[in-house]
Amino acid sequence: MKPINHIPDAFLTSVLKIFAKNPFDAYNHKQITSRLGISGKDSKMMVNAAINHLYESGALIDTDRGKFKLNPKHISRDLKQDSFIEGKVDMKQTGKAYVMHDEKDFDDIFIAPNNTHHALHGDRVRVHLFPLRKGRKQEGQIIEILERAKKQFVGTIQISKRYAFVVPDSQHVPIDIFIPTDGLNGASDGDKVVARITEWPERSNNPFGEIIKVLGKPGNNDVEMESVLADFDFPLFFKPETLKESEEIPEKITEKDIRQRRDFRDVITVTIDPADAKDFDDALSYRILPNGNTEIGVHIADVTH
């Protein structure tokens, strides 16, 4: 049988479209031949040649046991360019999502829970659009995560004998994070923690992670405050150079400071901030004026100074 030296462009497109319709599924030569509904040795050789050509051109990637699937980074010129869009994920608690198109004139794309491809809230993704059905919202399937919005999540850890899970606080994160026992970092069951995702295997429903900080028990005021900071990726500690600089600030009020300010030290003046305040910048004063009236002063100091 003679080798195939030329593959018609239309045939290549037909093969590629099968992979594009199911970008996460892998197929071998026999499965593609069956889906095309063709038979005969010549046709089968044409399919083999087409798949090999698409693989060598980078349109397909090989998986295992002679199977191939669509390369998510490849968008063929033979496929309609408007069947792919990029945007930002708005994840819901139920697991479904909407992708907000970069162009504001476009409606959001509905993504069913089984078509999110491990995307999380806020991620930038590429979406393959499904054919629009009459009377239905535009739907699609996420085929590539372009940029992760975040990798650290605040939640409560649930520990069993062999493994643990972190249940994220955010309603926009509908999955739990699997934590191996060697990644607990001293956390106890029920602790509020900060977890970092380390990997997310292709066929795993849950990402794998590790505990990078134990915040404490839920309900404690300081723990809840740190949880909010950590959830928005604010640092929980001052940098060493910041602490060093703060230690160099003199505690004594200089004569220059006094000359630049109004001095109320001869007037009964008391601060009204609580004892555990981080700054004391509010005060009240009291004195009797020469005409017999009582003056109550309200003081707000320049705390930044």
Image (spheres, rainbow, N blue to C red):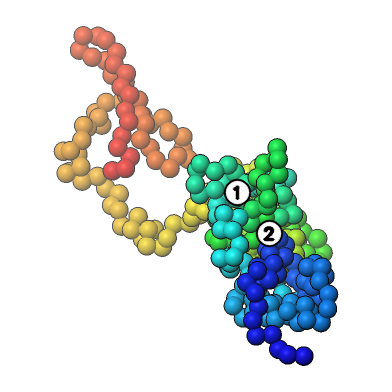
> Which label sits on residue 117?
2
> Which quadrant would the C terminus be assigned to in this image?
top left
The quadrant where residue 283 appears: top left
Pointer 2 or 1: first along the chain: 1
Pointer 1 local density, CA inside 10 Å: few below 14, some 14–19, many at least 20: many
Q: Position of residue 215 (x, y in %)?
A: 61, 53
Relative to 178, residue 113 above or below: above
> Which label sits on residue 99?
1
Determine the CA span between mark 2 and mark 1: 13 Å
Q: Position of residue 182 (x, y in %)?
A: 71, 70
Q: Residue at x 57, y 54 (%)?
A: 82
Looking at the image, which is closer to me, 86 or 35?
Answer: 35
Query: Is 249 left, or right, of 217 in this rendering?
Result: left
Q: For residue 152, say whether it is visible.
A: no
Q: Position of residue 297 (x, y in %)?
A: 30, 22
Relative to 214, residue 279 above or below: above
Q: Residue at x 73, y 90 (%)?
A: 2
Relative to 184, residue 6 above or below: below
